[in-house]
Image (cartoon, grey):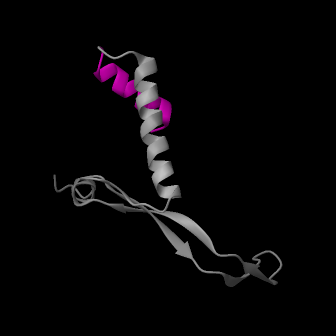
Amino acid sequence: MIRSELIQKIADENPHLYQRDVERIVNTVFEEVTDAMSRGDRVELRGFGAFSVKKRDARTGRNPRTGETVEVDEKHVPFFKTGKLLRDRLNGKS
């Protein structure tokens, strides 16, 4: 599902809301999650999962095309851990 499909589904299920308001709400939620993660905070959505940021240390890597070694800088990457409710539903235990 992409963002526009999510907005449309929410708008369809809530006919009392204008589509532009639903779009603003969805965009605000994504912006807040992004802002929190950029500050290094953890974002937990009960029953769904938790978003966090993990640090990967600098290391020596290898260019798969040429085989030469390259230095890979330290970086921060997003990490998602599913919640129990989502994990159970995906495994047919709902």
Asked if 55 appears above or below 24 in the picture, the reply is below
Q: Is residue 11 magenta?
A: yes
Q: Is residue 31 magenta?
A: no
Q: Residue at x 55, y 65 (%)?
A: 77
Q: Quadrant of the N terminus?
A: top left
Q: Residue at x 41, y 30 (%)?
A: 25
Asked if 90 appears above or below 8 in the picture, the reply is below
Task: Give the dominant element type of the magenta stretch: helix, strand or loop.
Answer: helix
Q: Which residues are magenta?
A: 1-15
Residue 86: x and y, percent?
Answer: 27, 54
Q: Residue at x 54, y 73 (%)?
A: 55
Left or right of 90 on screen, residue 56: right
Residue 30: x and y, percent?
Answer: 46, 42
Residue 42: x and y, percent?
Answer: 39, 60
Left or right of 18 on screen, residue 35: right
Q: Residue furthest left?
A: 94
Say which of 1 and 32 sits in front: 32
